[in-house]
Amino acid sequence: MTKNFRLILILFFLIFLNPIYVNSCDRAYNPSKITVAGGSITEILYFLEEQSKIVAVDLTSNFPEETKKFPSIGYVRNLSAEGVLSLKPTLVIGEDDMGPPDVVNQIKKTGIDIIILKEEHSSEGIIDKIKCVGEIIGEREKTIDIINNKIMPIKIELDNLSKNLKNQNIKVMFILTMDSGSPIIGGKDTSADGFIKMIGARNAFDSFEGWKPVGTESIIDAAPDIILISNRGAHSYKNLENMHNHPTVKYTPAAINRNIIALDGMQMLGFGPRTIETALYLSKKFQMIENN
Amino acid sequence: MSIYSKDIALFYDEKEILKDISIEIREGKITTLLGPNGAGKSSFLNIISGDLDFYNGEVLYNQRNLKEINIQEKAFLRSVMAQSQPIVFDFSVKEIVEMGWLEKGNIKYSDNFKTALNEVLIECDIDYLKNRKFNTLSGGEQRRVHFARSLLQLWRESNSVDPCYLMLDEPTSNLDLFHQIKMMNAIKKLSTEGIGIFMILHDLNLAFKYSDYIAILKNGKIISFGEPKSIINDDVLSSAFGVKIQVNKKDDNIFINYV
Amino acid sequence: MLSIINLKFLNSAQSFILFFLLILLLLVLIVSFSLGSYSFPVLSILMGNTSAIEATIFTEIRVPRVILAAIVGASLSVSGACLQGLFRNPLADPGLIGVSAGAALGASTIIVFGSSLTSAFIFSTFLLPLSACLGSGLVILMLFLLTRGFGHQGVTYMLLVGIAVNAIASVGIGILTFISSDSELRSLTFWTMGSFGGITWSLLIPALIIIFISFLFLLPILRNLDILQLGESEAKRLGVNVKSLKYRIIFASAASVGASVSLSGMIGFVGLVVPHLLRLLSGVNHTYVVIGSALLGSSLMVFADLLSRLLIQPAELPVGLITSAIGSPFFLWLIFRINKI
């Protein structure tokens, strides 16, 4: 069983390392009924106050709270063609983790407009994505207004703060989960890596690529000043207090100085409008940490 | 001192396999059970060795009911050499023989382990095989190894008076003539040392030559029991085996002819 | 302790190999204690002149991890050797016949349903290993029933039963995966890959005690396991209490596999490879094979963990990946060899 399971797992990841081709940001033919596969796109549609166009969302769309009222099409990496089509959308928008590719192709063959956005893990990437969504749904002017009023001030403040922070060389470790065995940590070229850079800090583990398990000794060796973890990842410890005392992180500067921070996963790694706010929030917080 | 079977009856799937069998197996004597296939010989051996316990009647070991003797004590009272199963792992001949050496409760003999082992290896003519892998031996050689193991299980110091019994199910099958005779002589020697022997044989000549008592079993019933000379006659044997048999007696020897 | 092992039946080559394996284990332990991704001279720790953090890393992180690897290696190999003896089947391995999968299923069930019920300490220290032991015990019991009391049914039959049991356990784990949350799911994949990370003394010591007791349970019956190879009725004639022998092995294997799987996840093929290496080296009697399996199994596992820690540091290779990479070709070779006989 384990053998097959592993094989499937490996194949699974091989397939998803190949990005399916990415569309340009042209206006869609009919954006009136949208099925969304990607939490950040749902977030953007709400941000642009265009939520009335949504007919269905995937499981990663959990913000804002009311998205729960929409029918769910399942997990973004593992969609079923009929499930997506059953709600008769006129447009499907996803990100490049949408899959599996065969299902995406099946949907394409039905003639329904399907647009896959490229994800770039930076503030510029987020702004581009919002712009792109705005253009697709045919609300270009409104979108640029909203970006200029709501996002740009945050971005400018974040850019200043993160420039400051860079000189302080703060090392951040991003933990996905740490339930059993060694914790799974974000390395180079992961969304976590991009998020840490947005804040203006340094990824404590930029010597390897992807998400990998890391042993306790390596964690102590890397000596992260701050540990970020998703609420879900921290959930297994009931509260942050237990987490600070967990043997795998207990001896890091982060735990000793009580700098383990748990936030909603999509808020950090969704790369929607919230991500840029969160980066600003953390960037501010980190400056205070250093001032202490 | 003896094993006494009293009114043994065995039913299996509502079929009567054995009917009211009463036999005594005496210390220092060879008692042989003869009979055609399916007569119930092996079932009877399994009952008096204690392998089967769903029979009617009683088996008494030196006046003790067999069912009240625990499994370890039984191992000291009797040794059984039956048809053997294949062995998966590659044990050496020596290791297979050593398995007959009973450890628990046998402290008074345990110093003699090496002596006893060498004795039985030589007795069974397998000393030269002792470092070979058991699974590479021929059927006859494997039989001799199992025989040596049974002997080791019963090994006692020469002045010992502990009663014990050896039960053999067709011990000579697969053996060449030389080793048949050698094994029968070894069995005879054991009986003169005081061990009670009970065996199943197919070879009538060997049976009559070596046995002190013979029982003939047919359809689950003993049809004849006694000393070879007293029970042997053409009619009994012919009716037991369903072939015409002629017995020639010359001096003390008995020869069987099939006609 | 030596009095409960019957050393009389070891030949001199076997005694030498066991002695050599003991030395090997000590060497591997010393190397493993001194190497890690956080480097510092271990000698200075023993002398007492190091910084507090280095001493802590050594005693709280490295030593428990190495000891965990050692006892997991020993318990998987020993139960592999004993189950092979009990089933009279050279291909019995806790992983192949589904015992590990049963333990993983037990542990997963309690992770998905039980983690919110009790405090973290009681949960991970007692409930998790207990439920893993229960899972492995149930699988062995099921095998017991399916093979009619471990009667000799041939090599293929056992493997087929193992495939079925593994499939059943994977259905169970699959259902749990389906109903579990995202982070619980991540930790479920851990059970199928195996890891020694994140171990603490408070988790290690109960497992150490369980495994030690189950070994004590096994040691006096190694001779009887040899005799069982003659066949069940033959063993009875030689005074072996076959029923109690079976129960002892079932209990001890379930407990030691359950305890180790609950801490390290499923690590395949160790229980198959190690006893066979010993048989290839020098003989098949269980006194030698089982004691040797404990020594060689822990050496190999400590070494595999060392590789997992060092090869792609600072990240880690799942240790189950290393053992399977070595074990699966060996398994194929073994099948061909058995077919030839």
Image (spheres, coloured by chain):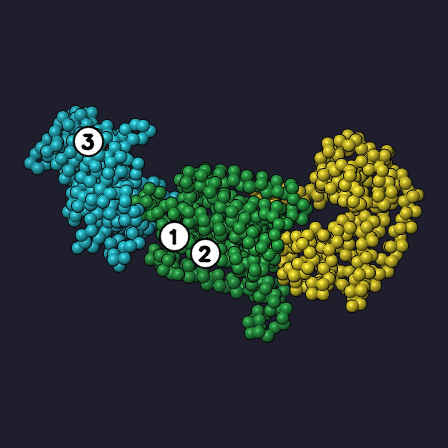
For disc 2, the chain is C
Question: For the N terminus of chain C, which image quadrant?
Answer: bottom left
CA distance for labels 1 and 3 = 43 Å
Q: Which mark is residue C109?
A: none
As displayed, is residue A14 above or below residue C124? above
Neighbourhood count class around disc 2 (C-alpha, 10 Å): few under 14, some 14–19, many 20 upward: some
- The disc labelled 3 sits on which kind of residue? Ile
Q: Which mark is residue B222?
A: 3
User: Which residue position is annotated with label 2?
Assistant: C213
As displayed, is residue A242 above or below residue C110? below
Residue C202 in sight here: yes
Q: Quadrant of residue A226?
A: bottom right
Q: Position of residue B130 (x, y in %)?
A: 30, 50
| C305 left or right, relative to B212 | right
Asked if labels 3 and 2 touch by Cβ distance under 8 angstroms, the answer is no
Neighbourhood count class around disc 3 (C-alpha, 10 Å): few under 14, some 14–19, many 20 upward: many
- The disc labelled 2 sits on which kind of residue? Ile
As displayed, is residue A16 above or below residue A202? above
Judging from the image, what secondary structure is the residue with disc 1 in?
A: helix
User: Which residue position is annotated with label 1?
Assistant: C222
